Image (spheres, helix red, strand yellow):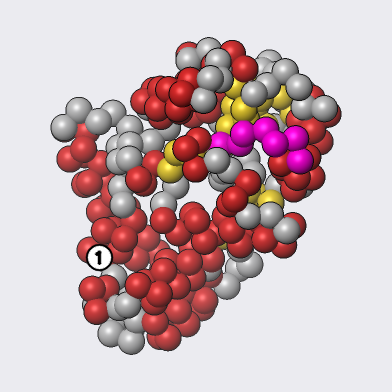
Amino acid sequence: MMFQAVIFDVYRTIMRIRTAPGDAEPRWREACLILLPGAPRDLTLEGFNLACRAVVDRLQLQARACGIPCPEVFWPDVMGETVPGWEQLDAATQERFQIQHLGSQRLLDLMPGAAEVLQHLSRQSLPLGIASNAQPYTLTEFNDALSPAGLSMSLFSPDLVFWSWTHGFSKPDAHVFRILTFRLLARGIDPARVLMVGDRVDNDIVPARAFGWQTWHLREQGDGPEQGGDWTALGQFLT
């Protein structure tokens, strides 16, 4: 195999995001009634999302003022400013609320063909990593998507995993790929022998190439000039 390591984006690369059934508002209200008994009865899903967006915008503006061009927020802090009585909830309830809030609006599972390719790479003992804009709840969502295929986060080498929420900045910041490049070099892996797999040219392909990585643009066949295709094509490319 020509590569010594493969680094993956997560959302819309390994995990498919689909629109949830058209009952987001009732599911949201049910979650509030069960998990947030003190929440105002007139707190709509749209209103809550707008409140979250306002907090995110403010926190990102503050970070940019400190010289961080691609800031990331810490989602539990956003929840702390928008969820009534958040600080009184135990950690398990906080996580459950976040998952149910997101789950009312979207469905997640593995991209078609992803499990087979990941299983193949695992059998080859090839170091696998992650470069993802993500939040703490991503760990639950990702494990829930992997487990039906008999997979888990143990597929990925901890030193080659970059979650944006643990660093305070996100892709396409060049520091994401600089950090991973140096971790790869510490393993004796040259950047030219690393493959980045992602669905976005701006977040994944361009910054990875800037550090000498090779890239695979995950997309429909024939869509775009970059080397790429769907998971079936990626599997054929890697074998």
The relative height of residue 207 versus residue 139 in the rendered view (above or below) is above
The relative height of residue 185 versus residue 55 in the rendered view (above or below) is above
Q: Which residue is drawn at 36% across and 25% down?
A: 175
The relative height of residue 154 versus residue 222 in the rendered view (above or below) is below
Is residue 37 shown to the viewer in this render?
A: yes
Q: Nearer the viewer, residue 24 or 64?
A: 64
Q: Mark 1 points at which residue?
A: 80
User: Which picture quadrant has residue 214?
Assistant: top right
Q: In this view, does 210 lie to the left or right of 65?
A: right
Q: Which residue is drawn at 49% across and 54% down?
A: 138
Three-letter residue code for mark 1:
Gly
Residues shaded magenta: 123-129
Q: Which of 85 and 239 is in front in this view?
A: 239
Q: In this view, does 175 lie to the left or right of 81?
A: right
Q: What is the secondary structure assignment of the residue under circle 1?
A: helix
Q: Which residue is drawn at 59% across and 50% down?
A: 154
Count neighbours of disc 1 (C-alpha within 10 A) and say few if under 14, some if 14 to 19, many if 20 or more: some
Q: Which residue is drawn at 54% across and 16% down?
A: 191
Q: Where is residue 152 in the image (x, y as percent from the top left)?
A: 63, 55
Is 22 inside the magenta-drawn segment?
A: no
Q: Is residue 213 left or right of residue 29?
A: right
| Quadrant the C terminus occupies | top right
Is residue 12 shown to the viewer in this render?
A: no
Q: Where is residue 27 in the image (x, y as percent from the top left)?
A: 52, 76
| Quadrant the N terminus occupies | top right
Q: Is residue 77 left or right of residue 100?
A: left
